[in-house]
Amino acid sequence: MRVLCRTLVAVALLTASACDDDAPLSPSEASNTVRIVFAGSTTRRSDLPASAQGCAAGVGVTHIHPSWRNFASIPLQAVPPDRYEISFTDVPVGTRVSFRINDQNSCDENPTGAVTRNVFANDVRLVQNTTTPGNGDEPGYALTIAANGTIGQ
């Protein structure tokens, strides 16, 4: 009877270890949520110079171009009066990624409307620290997210 019990316990232990759901994921398999916030007016500025009007028309709605989605244009959600935001759940963990935000109200600071300040990721203020593809190289942000959601630049 003891041999049978020991055998059953051994089989149970092997089965449990083979089905370990807590196995760590590699950086390319893991992902975490990143909430991007751009602190900027959600209404178009009335004081944009005439030289910025073409840019503002070209930018359209305020949007983001994330590298992990091949820099596709994705509209940001306006949270009036002074914030845009979006959350991503597919950002690779432990991998440097980049993105750019374009906003009509930034057309007098950058000829493509690329935003260079007031951007946050998971409540961490980012500094413009990379370029992204667009109309030539455009200013953008690069970051790495850790498995616990911590943002590194």
Image (tube, rainbow, N blue to C red):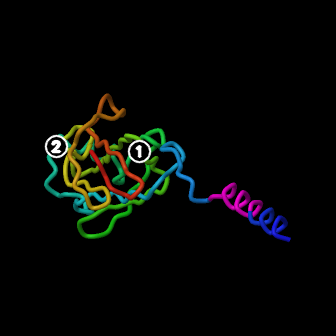
Residue 95 in the image, given as x and y percentages of width and height: 41, 41
Q: Could you tell me which quadrant the C terminus lies in?
A: top left
Specify the principal SS of the magenta part: helix
- Give the Cα separation between the discs numbered 1 and 2: 32 Å
Query: Residue 149 lies in magenta, yes or no?
Result: no
Mark 1 lies on residue: 94
Residue 115 in the image, given as x and y percentages of width and height: 24, 47
Classify mark 1: helix, strand or loop.
Answer: loop
Neighbours of disc 2 within 10 Å: few (<14), some (14-19), many (20+): few
What residue is rendered at 36% in x and 54% in y?
61
The amino acid type, in three-letter code, at marker 1 is: Gly
What residue is rendered at 33% in x and 56% in y?
150
Mark 2 lies on residue: 109
Comes first in the chain, label 1 or label 2: 1
In the image, taking residue 152 as reference, residue 93 lies left or right, namely: right
User: 15 or 142: nearer the eye?
Assistant: 15
The magenta segment is 10-20
User: 85 or 14: nearer the eye?
Assistant: 14
Residue 138 in the image, given as x and y percentages of width and height: 28, 35
User: 111 or 72: nearer the eye?
Assistant: 72
Residue 46 in the image, given as x and y percentages of width and height: 17, 58
Query: How many marks can you see?
Result: 2
Residue closest to the far front: 2
Q: Could you tell me which quadrant the N terminus lies in?
A: bottom right
